Image (cartoon, grey):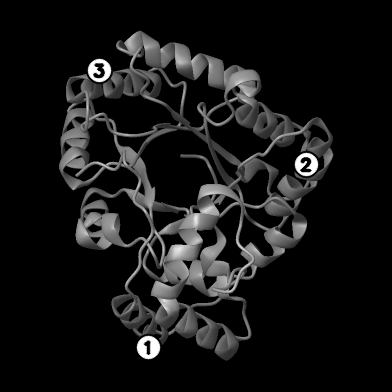
Amino acid sequence: MGCGTWAWGNRLLWDYSADMDQALQAVFNACVSGGITFFDTGDSYGTGRLSGRSEALLGQFSQAYSGPNRNAICLATKLAPYPWRLTRGAMASAHRASAERMGRVDLVQLHWSTANYFPWQENVLLDGLADLYAQGKVAGIGLSNFGPQRLRLAHGRLWKRGIPIKTLQVQYSLLSTYPVDTLGLKTLCDELGIRLIAYSPLCLGILAGKYSEGGPYPKGLRGLVFRQLLPKIRPLLAQLEATAQKWDKTMAQVALNWCICKGTMPIPGAKSPKQVAENLGAMGWMLTPEDVAALDEAIARSEGAAVQNPFQSK
């Protein structure tokens, strides 16, 4: 794809305020100089008055960066299959708007499958993405939240035009194994030559060991979910902590390395250089097969799991 090495990824999620730009530029710089060169966003990240702000910031940071690994930067975005995007041209228009905000789009992805509500819409949107690739406007096409049934259909449709699907990203972590394991997505992706990307690999921070049953909890719905989930995953958190101590790593680094050992590319968020450094600490080493098995067994002994994305198709 001309996007550097597909060995790691980083997803920057913005809770934007104007005075954050400089700090976030430092985060971006730390990522790229440290070898994190894949950046994923979406045209639906940042709504209302901040419409498209995530893409705009990513483009701004990429263009301003001049350090090591600059030529390896890969900018990816996901185009949302909104109900009003009903034609191939709608994908062209969406891509054009994203490219204007970002400066360029290397990997364009369909944000989710419409199989759960408007299955007839999906083929038109896939054709629109294929047109972008055929016209040389993007280096690759990817999908998000597709299950094996829809993935096979999409792959077959694009393959008839000689267009490969480069990536598929799904929710995947120690607390969200359903799409990959239960649905068998990793096996299918390997068969089709598709790189599997794991989003939310730290499950909103609960796998980073930042929260305990006694609190404090994050605010809002996230706090309510954590309050209910933490007591149910004691075996997993205990094993995660023990493994982290064994390797002299953080729980977050072990959780990310587990994703890597499973053959996926995790894309954790980062809002500070400290978080970037922690993410980088998950690279350059591997859990043993025994470590992975112990964590898998702890998953089986835990009673809780992350809430699945409602747009995940089968």
Residue type indicated by callout 1: Glu
How many discs appear?
Answer: 3
Cα distance in 3D space between marks 1 and 3 = 46 Å
Q: Quadrant of the C terminus?
A: top left
Q: What element carries label 3?
A: helix
Cα distance in 3D space between marks 2 and 1 = 39 Å
Question: In the displayed structure, does residue 108 sit left or right of residue 178?
Answer: right
Cα distance in 3D space between marks 3 and 2 = 37 Å
Q: Which of 179 and 87 is in front in this view?
A: 179
Residue 124 is tagged as 3
Position of residue 224 measured from the top left corner of the image (x, y, whole percent): 50, 56
The residue to which callout 2 is attached is: 25
Residue type indicated by callout 2: Gln
Q: Earlier in the sequence, mark 2 or mark 1?
A: 2
Give the residue at x 46% y 16%. 94
Position of residue 35 measured from the top left corner of the image (x, y, whole percent): 65, 56
Residue type indicated by callout 3: Val
The residue to which callout 1 is attached is: 290
Disc 1 crowd rating (10 Å Cα; few below 14, some 14-19, many 20+) is: few
